[in-house]
C-alpha cells in the first residue's frame, strides 16, 4: 500500500498555493487559480508522462469554450488541464474534495459538483465561467466508463445552449492501456498518452430556445460530433 505525504506537508503546500493564487469566492471560480493550475498541470503531465497533443490549435483563442472530454481514468482531467492552450475550469465530483486536496482543487479554479442532486450552485458557478469568456471542462458521460461517448447526460447541452459557447471535443487515449509499476492506479511513468482536440462547433440550432425538445436535439447533435471525433482520433493515433 502506498503511503501518502503527511497532512502537515500537504497542508503547507496548500497554504503556499493559496497565497500564490489568492482566495476566490464560492460563486466565482478563480481565473488566476486556473492559470496557476494549468502551470502545475504542464509540469506534472510532461514531467511524469509523454503526452502527445494533437490539434490543440483548434481551441478558440478567446471567448467561452466547453471542452467535452471522454473519461476512462482519473488522470484524464489533469492531462487535459496540462495540455490545453487555455486555463480550464473542470466540473469535479464532490467526492474528490477530501482533506488538503479539497483546498487545492478549489484554489485552482475547479468547480465542485454534487452528482446526487441537481446542484444549482455548481450550475451557477459553471455558467459564470462561460459568461466571463472562460473555458469549462466537462466529462459529458457523467462518470468514468468506456470513454466512448455512448451515454451523454443533458448537462453539456444545457451549458452549451444556455451560454452559446463553442464545444471542442477532446479524446484522451491510452491512459488505461497499461498500469504503472510504482503506482498501479496510474499509467506507467514516461508512458505515452494521446490527447486529440477536435473542431469547435455550436450545439444549438440558432434559435436560442432552451426547451426540453431543443436540449434533446442538441444532445443528439453533440453525441454525433463527439462519437465521430473519437473514431477519427483512434484512426489518427492508431489506438
Image (tube, grey):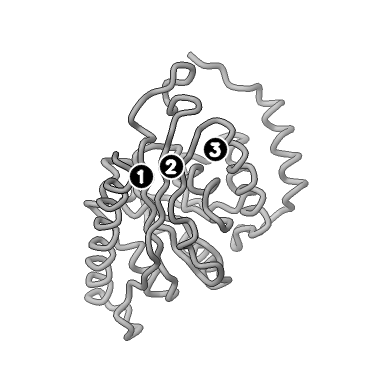
126, above or below 34, in the image: below
Horizontal arrangement in the rendering, residue 136 relative to residue 225 (left or right): right
Q: Earlier in the sequence, mark 1 or mark 2?
A: 1
Q: Position of residue 205 (x, y in %)?
A: 29, 80
**Label 3 with label 1: CB-CB less than 8 Å:** no
Q: Secondary structure at mark 1?
A: loop
**Residue under pointer 3:** 45
Horizontal arrangement in the rendering, residue 96 relative to residue 29 (left or right): left
Q: Secondary structure at mark 3?
A: helix
Q: Earlier in the sequence, mark 2 or mark 3?
A: 3
**Residue under pointer 2:** 76
Is residue 98 visible in the rendered structure shown here? Answer: yes
Mark 3–mark 1 distance (CA, rounded to whole Å): 17 Å
Q: Position of residue 142 (x, y in %)?
A: 33, 50
Q: Which mark is residue 71?
A: 1
Query: Residue 5's image quarter?
Result: top right
Mark 1–mark 2 distance (CA, rounded to whole Å): 6 Å
Horizontal arrangement in the rendering, residue 208 relative to residue 81 (left or right): left
**Label 1 with label 2: CB-CB less than 8 Å:** yes
Mark 2–mark 3 distance (CA, rounded to whole Å): 10 Å
Question: How many other residues sit within 10 Å of disc 2, few (<14), some (14-19) or many (≥20)?
Answer: many
Amino acid at each position: 500500500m502506498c503511503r501518502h505525504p503527511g497532512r502537515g506537508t500537504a497542508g503547507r503546500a496548500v497554504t503556499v498555493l493559496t497565497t500564490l493564487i489568492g482566495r476566490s469566492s464560492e460563486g466565482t471560480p478563480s481565473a488566476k487559480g486556473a492559470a496557476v493550475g494549468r502551470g502545475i498541470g504542464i509540469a506534472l503531465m510532461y514531467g511524469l508522462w509523454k503526452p502527445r497533443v494533437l490539434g490543440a490549435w483548434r481551441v478558440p483563442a478567446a471567448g467561452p469554450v466547453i471542452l467535452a472530454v471522454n473519461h476512462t481514468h482519473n488522470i484524464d482531467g489533469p492531462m487535459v488541464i496540462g495540455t490545453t492552450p487555455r486555463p480550464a475550469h473542470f466540473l469535479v465530483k464532490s467526492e474528490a474534495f477530501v482533506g488538503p486536496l479539497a483546498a487545492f482543487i478549489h484554489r485552482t479554479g475547479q468547480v465542485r459538483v454534487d452528482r446526487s442532486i441537481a446542484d444549482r450552485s455548481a450550475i451557477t458557478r459553471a455558467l459564470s465561467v462561460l459568461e466571463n469568456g472562460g473555458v469549462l471542462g466537462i466529462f459529458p458521460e457523467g462518470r468514468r466508463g468506456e470513454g466512448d461517448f455512448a451515454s451523454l447526460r443533458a448537462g453539456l447541452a444545457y451549458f452549451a445552449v444556455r451560454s452559446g459557447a463553442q464545444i471542442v471535443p477532446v479524446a484522451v487515449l491510452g491512459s488505461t492501456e497499461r498500469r504503472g509499476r510504482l503506482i498501479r492506479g496510474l499509467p506507467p511513468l514516461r508512458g505515452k498518452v494521446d490527447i486529440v482536440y477536435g473542431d469547435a462547433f455550436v450545439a444549438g440550432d440558432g434559435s436560442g430556445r432552451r426547451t426540453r425538445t431543443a436540449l434533446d436535439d442538441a444532445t443528439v447533435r453533440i453525441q454525433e460530433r463527439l462519437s465521430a471525433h473519437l473514431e477519427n482520433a483512434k484512426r489518427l493515433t492508431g489506438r
